[in-house]
Amino acid sequence: MRINMLKIVMSLATLFFLFSCNTKQEEFKKPNILFIMSDDHTSQAWGIYGGVLKDYVQNPNISRLADEGMVLNNAFCTNSICVPSRAAILTGQYSNRNGVYTLSDALSPDSLNIAKVLQNNGYQTAIIGKWHLKEEPSGFDYYNVLHDQGRYWDPILRTANNFHKNPEEWDVHKGFSTDVITDLSIKWMETIDKKKPFMLMTHFKATHEPFDYPERYNDLYKGIEIPEPASLFDFSPETTGRSFIGQKLENLGWFYEQASNDPDKWWCKYPGLPFYTKGLDSINARKQIYQKFIKDFMRSGAAIDDNIGKLLDYLEELGLAENTVIIYTADQGYFLGEHGFFDKRLIYEESLRMPFVIRYPKEIATGKYNDDI
């Protein structure tokens, strides 16, 4: 049975209205909201959407959410690049309304956003992890956000206490960023008033380039050849009819080689270097780039999955799971070799689709897929 998401939203709105009107507040307890979002963790790498990777992706906790909630098949962003997509998610507005069009734009602290709406309705609000919207977060009782894009190892995070201070006064947290962000999220939930509802946005840097992962996944997929997408060998307009070159996998291969030659001068640190394709023909070079790229990407995604598990287990232990709306999504899609591409930014389904799963036992049927836009 398909459930129209509008009906779900209206049901939640009715619930909030009844709560505000009824003196017996315990009868209409507002649900908590845990909104987990990763960066670029595209639907092809979730496993629950099928595809050539579904039997290889390590995803027990994403699958757990899907089994206990609903998967949206047709959620799309309108601007598939990090900053404008995140601004649209927070404000509910297109780029031409919120003023955030490109990576260099900033979201004004004066903008109305979902955190402010919930805060004004009695919610404790927090965002932890990737922010990337330049200006100081607003509408949040607490924030602890990555500086700029953030880094995978020993991430720098900024709070209200040091956001406007010099960089040497920002906080460095030892460890892998996905683990650090989860631990900080749990730490915040431990400190809040348990009698009031909360809305927590836990935003991971992963799986953004350079697709890094913790040491516990160094050997994941070792010795395994990952299946290739059907359009991996789209090379030229003669076979594709497409005049735009796009972000070809060969560009990523060149990045790997530059970082291998001089890692201290390259803009990011890729795992598993050195890597070269010298001496290989075009087919085998693309094959090798794809194998490295896709394994790194799925290893990075595996670390997201086990940290989702940590958050789910914490809510279960505190008895909060039944009254918490849990969402896991990504800010946009990503090319994993389809059309011979990596990255996003192009108006293709792989780039525009946002994977999305939602769990709320009181309102949402379990184990369902919804095709509504």
Image (cartoon, helix red, strand yellow):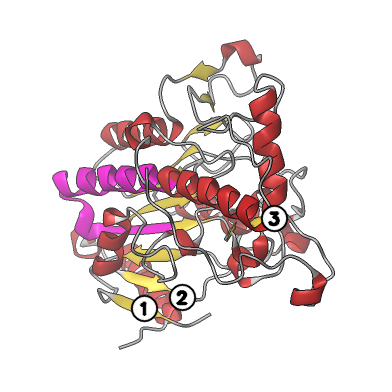
Between label 1 and label 3, give the one nearer the viewer.
3
- Mark 2: few/some/many CA within 10 Å (<14, 14-19, 20+): some
Say whether disc 1 or disc 2 marks the residue closer to the N-terminus.
Answer: 2
Mark 2: which amino acid?
A: Asn
- Measured Cα–Cα span from mark 1 to mark 3: 39 Å
Question: Is label 1 in a helix, a strand or a loop?
Answer: strand
* Residue for badge 3: 282
| 40 sits to left or right of 359 | right
Q: Which residue is situated farthest in the right direction here?
A: 243
The residues colored magenta run 301-328
Q: Is residue 198 visible?
A: yes
Location of residue 69 in the rendering, given as x and y in whole percent from the top left corner: 29, 68
Q: What residue is shown at x 52% (from left), y 71% (from top)?
A: 75
Question: Is label 2 in a helix, a strand or a loop?
Answer: loop
Mark 3: which amino acid?
A: Ser
Which image quadrant is residue 99 in?
A: bottom right
> Magenta residues: mostly which secondary structure?
helix
* Residue for badge 1: 369
* Residue for badge 2: 73
| 119 sits to left or right of 93 | left
In the displayed structure, 229 sits above or below 81; it is: below
Q: What residue is shown at x 73% (from left), y 43% (from top)?
A: 106
- Measured Cα–Cα span from mark 1 to mark 2: 7 Å
